[in-house]
Image (tube, grey):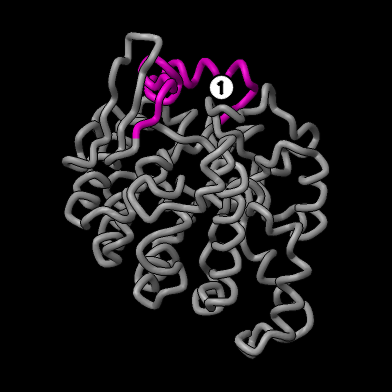
């Protein structure tokens, strides 16, 4: 089966690549005690305990495909592990990591071209290097786009990033954005989010919502009308605060003139893409009411702690697969 024929296309799935271990120098990544019941994964000074990558779908593509069959997923677009975005480390180490990562990603998807497509890691702290790596990944390696975190050394609307966005449109490929836990290789987040895994739930949702607002109010979508960006987890809190964003667009003095017209903010929200990995049918219903169906794609965080037990989109699966093909330029 090819992506053109796939009935269910999963656009939210991460990968851990053995070839990248140590590719960022002293920042890692590094896997420890893989054969014990206490494995760990290190990125810089951050250590994740108790998550098994070796021998799991994260690292074994054959096992991934078998689990996809069980889950009813026809095709999957795999993207960088959010723990290894490395957006805050020195550029030289980030560039080295991304090159190694993308070479390995291309090799993985080449093993299963009828089931897997790949997204490149990008060193966006160096926009020129990120531009060049995106071009190499797409034109030389055959990857389908790029994946970055929602936070880095500069705001997403910085003019320096325009060269990256321009390259996405020139290559006609999508940009996938997903949060990374605060404090791994960048500034620490709210200490209150350090309890109960709130950094993964509330922190991620806040990052995604901030990214949406920044892309709109900062003029990224206005400057790059052909740019397609897909946000994880339904854009975080975006559907719930859409009305407040729209009112701010009209009433707040900092809002640019081009966003003040009736319906402009809403139109910009519907320009972005969102995966439907939101866990709750009420949240999905609100997302559909706010942005419509046309820009939604299926996503699972495959093999992650919050992966759904089964494909839950029901009769929407075909429509979302067609949406994914439009986003991926595959049909």
How many other residues sit within 10 Å of disc 1, few (<14), some (14-19) or many (≥20)?
Answer: many
* Residue drawn at (31%, 52%) of the image: 139
* Residue drawn at (26%, 29%) of the image: 30
Q: Position of residue 156 (x, y in %)?
A: 45, 67
Closer-to-camera residue (229/107): 229
Q: Position of residue 225 (x, y in %)?
A: 55, 74
In the image, residue 132 lies in the stretch drawn in magenta? no
Closer-to-camera residue (175/324): 175
**Judging from the image, what secondary structure is the residue with disc 1 in?**
helix
In-image side of 79 versus 218 (left or right): left
In-image side of 71 versus 43 (left or right): right
* Residue drawn at (17%, 40%) of the image: 26
Please tell me whether residue 246 is drawn above or below residue 305 in the rendered image: below
In-image side of 309 versus 231 (left or right): right
Please tell me whether residue 50 is drawn above or below residue 174 in the rendered image: above
Image quadrant occupied by the N terminus: top right
Q: Which residues are magenta?
A: 47-75
Q: Position of residue 321 (x, y in %)?
A: 65, 41
Q: What residue sits right under mark 1 in the picture?
A: 68
- Residue farthest toward the top in the current orientation of the protein: 36
Q: Position of residue 134 (x, y in %)?
A: 32, 56
């Amino acid at each position: 089966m090819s992506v053109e024929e796939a009935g269910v296309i999963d656009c939210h799935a991460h990968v851990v690549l053995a070839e990248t271990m140590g590719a960022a120098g002293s920042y890692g990544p590094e896997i420890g005690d893989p054969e014990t019941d206490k494995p760990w994964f290190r990125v810089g000074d951050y250590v994740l305990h108790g998550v098994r990558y070796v021998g799991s779908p994260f690292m074994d593509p054959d096992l991934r495909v078998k689990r996809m069959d069980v889950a009813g997923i026809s095709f999957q677009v795999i993207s960088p592990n959010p723990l290894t975005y490395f957006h805050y480390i020195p550029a030289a180490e980030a560039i080295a990591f991304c090159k190694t990562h993308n070479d390995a990603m291309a090799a993985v998807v080449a093993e299963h071209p009828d089931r897997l497509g790949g997204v490149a890691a990008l060193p966006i702290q160096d926009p020129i290097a990120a531009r060049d790596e995106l071009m190499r990944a797409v034109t030389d390696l055959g990857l389908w786009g790029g994946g970055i975190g929602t936070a880095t050394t500069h705001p997403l609307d910085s003019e320096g990033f325009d060269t990256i966005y321009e390259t996405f449109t020139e290559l006609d490929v999508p940009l996938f954005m997903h949060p990374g836990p605060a404090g791994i290789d960048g500034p620490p987040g709210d200490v209150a989010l350090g309890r109960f895994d709130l950094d993964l739930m509330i922190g991620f949702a806040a990052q995604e919502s901030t990214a949406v607002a920044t892309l709109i109010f900062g003029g990224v979508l206005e400057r790059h009308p052909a740019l397609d960006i897909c946000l994880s987890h339904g854009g975080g809190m975006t559907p719930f605060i859409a009305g407040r964003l729209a009112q701010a667009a009209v009433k707040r003095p900092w809002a640019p003139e081009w966003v003040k017209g009736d319906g402009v903010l809403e139109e910009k929200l519907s320009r972005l893409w969102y995966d439907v990995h939101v866990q709750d049918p009420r949240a999905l219903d609100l997302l559909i009411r706010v942005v419509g169906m046309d820009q939604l794609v299926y996503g699972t965080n495959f093999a992650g702690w919050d992966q759904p037990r089964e494909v839950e989109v029901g009769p929407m699966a075909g429509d979302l697969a067609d949406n994914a093909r439009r986003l991926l330029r595959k049909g």
